[in-house]
């Protein structure tokens, strides 16, 4: 499975495990933005 991502990630200088960590961080940041948006509209 990771071989499929290797060419795509090579351009970003990321390994597959690094990519997985980045996905988790991006999702957390997105969730934080949604929460902040909801709090500011109250």
Image (cartoon, rainbow, N blue to C red):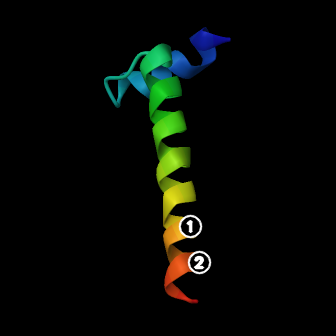
How far across and how far down the image is residue 16, in percent?
50, 17
Q: Secondary structure at mark 1?
A: helix
**Which residue corresponds to mark 2?**
38
Name the residue rendered at 62%, 17% in the picture.
4
> Badge 2, how many Cα within 10 Å: few under 14, some, many 20+?
few
Crowdedness of circle 1 by 10 Å Cα count: few (<14), some, many (20+)?
few
Q: For the point 58% across and 89% down, which residue is it?
A: 42
Vertical placement of residue 38 versus 33, above or below: below
The reply to whether discs 1 and 2 touch (Cβ–Cβ < 8 Å) is: yes
**x%, y% of residue 19?**
47, 26
Residue 31 percent location from the top left of the image: 57, 56
| In this picture, residue 24 sits left or right of residue 15 | right
- Separation of residues labelled 1 and 2 (CA atoms): 5 Å
Using the image as rendered, state which of residue 26 and residue 5 is in the foreground: 26
Q: Which residue is mark 1?
A: 35
Q: Could you tell me which secondary element the residue under label 2 belongs to?
A: helix
Residue sitting at the far right: 1
Work out whether residue 11 or residue 27 is closer to the camera in this orientation and state it.
27
Q: Nearer the viewer, residue 28 or 41?
A: 41
Horizontally, residue 15 falls left or right of residue 13, namely right
Numbered circle sitting on residue 26: none
- Tell me the residue at 68%/11% (across/down): 1
């Amino acid at each position: 499975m990771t071989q499929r991502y290797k060419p795509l990630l090579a351009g970003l200088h990321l390994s597959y495990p690094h990519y997985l960590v980045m996905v988790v961080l991006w999702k957390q940041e997105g969730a934080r933005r949604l929460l902040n948006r909801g709090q500011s509209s109250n």
